[in-house]
Amino acid sequence: MTPPTAPVPVQDAVLDPDQLAAWVATQAGLARVPGVQYAVLVDGEPVLDGAWGVADVTSGEPLRADHVFRVASHSKTFTAVAVARLVEEGVLRFDDPFEQHLPELAGAPVGRVTLREALGHTGGVLRDGRDADHWQLGAPFPDRAALLPSVRADGEVFGRGERFKYSNLGYGLLGLVVEVVTGRSYAEHVRAAVVEPLGLRDTAPELDDAVAGRSVVGHSARGVDDDGRLPVAAVTTGALAAATGFCSTARDLVRWFAALVGDESLLRPETRRLLRRTESVVERPRARRRAYGLGLEVRRIEGHDVVGHSGGFPGQLTRTWAGVDGRVVVSVLTNAVDGPADALATGLFSLVATAVDDADPAAGAPEDPDRWTGRFANLWGQTDLVRLGRRLWMIDPRQADPLAGAEELVVDGDVLRPLPHGGFGPVGEPVEVVRDPGGDRVAAIVVGGMTSWPLAEYEAQRRAHLGRTV
């Protein structure tokens, strides 16, 4: 595991990367995912950059913060910016139909789809093709010669503007448009126009020799009856690179999204607003409400408007979120097809944003709040006492949403009192903090009358009873 960075002051808040990394490790361990790479920026400064687990379950190679992942549909954010920059330069218009630049599509329904409709997935274009087994390595990803005839003959599913319909093929066509109007390959143009000027050294539009030596191995989902996973071979993405070809690291992606929401050298402010403006809302019974702009997902987390994207590639799942105010950016990359990247990135954003929001000195932080913090365990599970900004919180680190059921605590002598409210647990009951004879170390906490001990001590006893070494 890559060690997290040291605590970094953020205005009047202190974000403890050890606490954040421990929460990620707990979630990753519960999910039995091979590896997780993560990074956090606050106000443009890195406060977390680390990794947990292995890059390859077969070799057991430890995962590092500089291992490269296939970040898949994060590619759409790069493509959207590349197209938007060409619009700003007057080379393209958002209302250009595909057939204007790809004459092979003239007269076909897909040919009339505009660049804006493709960017926002409102063109009604087929998602992956009638034969999409390239997504499970049953065939190569389509090249230009295969993509254009297939979408011309059978690429329309809905009418233009009729519904939000996510389409990798539509983004593949956008990549071909970039090639036509720039006279360069998609990879060459995006690398020169976007990647290199921002100094994203771990980022490439396609898996190539420069990054292949540091790339992780993807893995299948674990079995229903066991934790066994199959390694997934690395492949290139052909004409769908603009939809899913990019490789990167968490540390590069947080810098990329920070630039995307706030760097005027990348895009004009009005263009950035256009990309993140909600074009479509997808609401289905018993499912999360989702929204999309142009190349960006749109969500609200802990009262913050955020934009971001997920990425799903054979054997890897990834997610990045950035507050539109540019303060907090979080990226989480996993090397398994069932990796909890979205939950981890959303949870990390919640924790960091809460700390930043509570940075006001008027909040009245207790003196030396860190002497109250730590991770504790008993028969029923684990409890974290953590500092977020200038406040103390009691959190269950097993919860995918770390603030679900969390209690804000106020120091009152030798006890910590939760804010009063109703509930089924020991609400309103003080948390007793038991210290060692010297008074410096927390030897135990008592919550609802039940004792929990420091995690390392409890785990040593648990493993001893199981006959295992720590």
Image (cartoon, rainbow, N blue to C red):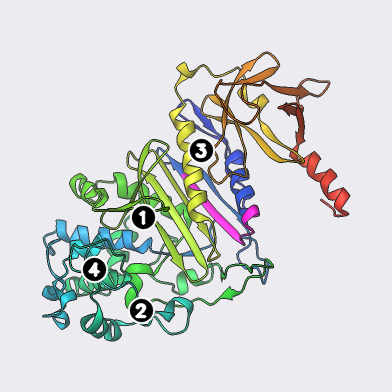
> For residue 38: magenta?
yes
State left or right for residue 60 relative to residue 302. right
Q: Residues within 10 Å of mark 3 (few under 14, many from 20)?
A: many
Which badge, 2 or 4, comes first in the chain's sequence?
4
Residue visible at 54% across and 23% down in the picture = 421
Q: CA distance from mark 1 to mark 2?
A: 33 Å
Q: What residue sits right under mark 1 in the picture?
A: 284
Mark 3 residue type: Leu
Mark 1 residue type: Arg
Which badge, 3 or 4, comes first in the chain's sequence?
4
Q: CA distance from mark 1 to mark 4?
A: 18 Å
> For residue 354: magenta?
no
Q: Which residues, given as a range, are shown in magenta?
A: 29-40
The percent position of residue 382, horizontal first and vertical second, equals 69, 40
The percent position of residue 66, horizontal first and vertical second, equals 53, 58
State left or right for residue 463 relative to residue 224. right
Disc ID at residue 124: 4
